[in-house]
Each structure stands twice: as structure tokens, then as C-alpha cells.
Image: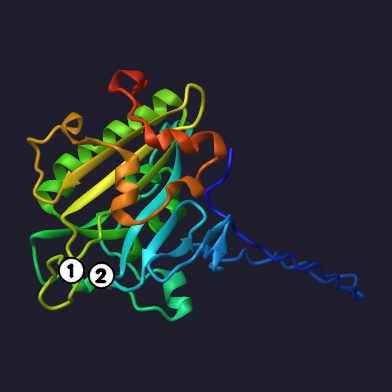
Amino acid sequence: MRRLGILLAAGVGFFIGCTTPPKSREVAPVPPPVEIPVAMDTSAVRGLVEKPSSIILDHKYFRIAYDPKTRLPKYVIYRLKGSDLKKPRVVKRSSKFRVDPILKKRGLETIKHEDYTETDIYDRGHMAPFADFSHDAIQGKLTFITSNAAPQKKNLNEHAWESLEGHIREWACGEGELVVITGSIIENNLPKMKKSGILIPREFFKIVIDDTPPRKVIAFLYKQDDDKTVKYIDRIAKAAEIQKRIGEDFSVELPVQDRLELEKVARLGDWKSKKCR
């Protein structure tokens, strides 16, 4: 299976020779601090060529196609493993989002945590959800970057959307491993937050791919005004139509054998569901 992230590491070998006095003490090496990795941020990642409307931010555990003009993620893609979801949670939710280190390194403008504080209507809605990565301290913390979020009304983010994320985790534990693609529909004439100018998407999508035989795909399209009364079965959509609407081709992200599956819609009954913890 293909890994979603590419991290280049340079190893430097060294040898130090010295004459040690007979009674000298050996000093234990100081361990390096734990840092969130900044992966490769080149203009082409595994065949994906950057374009003005979507640059690729590779964060090893998930990859973001980011729109530098709107400062919003077009989509985020990652592999969701049932074996990871069955592990105990080792990190608590953060209370603050931070600026994406790759965007900062490249000198690109990004949304700040404080840009959302002008209103209590919208949450910083995760695209790659924290709960999918809470089994690992580094991965969980990494989801709290502003490039991984878009404005979502609280009724959507905390009810209908969160419920869908829970169903997908149960599918991952039932099927073993899934590819998840999540994003916002960025289109013309979107409303904006008054002070920060952040665009407010009207719709959000998820595409779920099981790339182990029998392969299958299912997609969902949610509206900004959806609340706890909305059921995920009522929001099933076609992945191919979502691609057309946002002007992206997800097939280049997938193994060749999975690409045709984007044209199909699997039945809910085809998905194995299992509680993770």
C-alpha cells in the first residue's frame, strides 16, 4: 500500500576519536527534543504537480491540497487504519490551532487561530479530525494547524459532521484500512467573516475508499446548515461529481486499480462496521 506522506531525512555520520584519561566519566548524550515533523514541501509530490489553486502540504501523516488565495484547504487525504484506532488515546485535544509550519517556511499567508474569534457561530472545523490521530501525540497535535480547518457552524461540526466521522472510524475498524479525502467546496460568491475575511464554505465533502478487495467508494456532501437531525444516509453523493465541482482529480492520489471506483457509489450495506474501542 502506498504511504500518503513523503519525508526526506538526511543522515550525517560522524566519528570522534580522542584519548580519554583513565578516570574520566562518560557523559550520557542528551536526547533531542520531540518536534512535529515538517515534511517535504516540494512543488511535485508523488506525481501531483502544484498549481496556483492548490499547493501540496505534505505533513507525513496527512497531505493537504491548500488554496493560497482563499487560505483554505481544498481537501486533505490520509490513510485511516483500524489498528491505530484500536490503540488507546494518548493525547488530549488542543485548545488552540497554530500556523502551518510549511506555509510559514514558504512565506505564504495563512489564517491564524485568532481570526475565528470574531464570532461564536463558526468552529474551526477539522478536515483531518483529531480523533483519527489521537493514538499518537505528534499526529494528534499536528491536526491542530489552521490549514487543516475551515469555518463550520457549530450545529454541523459538533453534530452531523462529527457523527459521520464516527461512522467512518467504525468502517475503518471493520474493513481494516481506508483512504479518506475530506474538503470544502470553494466556489464564487462565498460569504466572508467581517473582520478576517475568511471565506465560509456552504458545503463540505468526504470521500471514503476501501482499496482492499472488494474495492469500493462512498462519498458524502454536507451543507453548512446541517444539524443533528441530518443522517449520513441522506448525504450520500458521487465522488466523480465532487471532483468536477472543485476542479480536482483525486485519481492521481490513488493506486491505478482504485481510480475507476471514483465513478461508482457503494451501498451502505457493503461496508463492514465495528466498534474500535
The amino acid beneath tag 1 is: Tyr
Q: Secondary structure at mark 2?
A: helix
The amino acid beneath tag 2 is: His
Give the side of residue 63 with respect to residue 125, left or right: right
Q: Nearer the viewer, residue 96 or 119?
A: 119
Give the side of residue 87 with respect to residue 202, left or right: right
Q: Position of residue 42 (x, y in %)?
A: 56, 68
Q: Secondary structure at mark 1?
A: helix
Q: Residue furthest bottom?
A: 107
Name the residue that disc number 2 marks: 113
Quadrant of the frame with the C terminus: top left
Residue 210 seen by the camera: yes
Q: Which residue is rendered at x = 90% and y = 70% of the image?
A: 22
Q: Residues within 10 Å of mark 2 (few under 14, many from 20)?
A: some
Residue 129 seen by the camera: no
Q: Which residue is rendered at x = 43% and y = 33% of the image?
A: 261
Name the residue that disc number 1 marks: 116
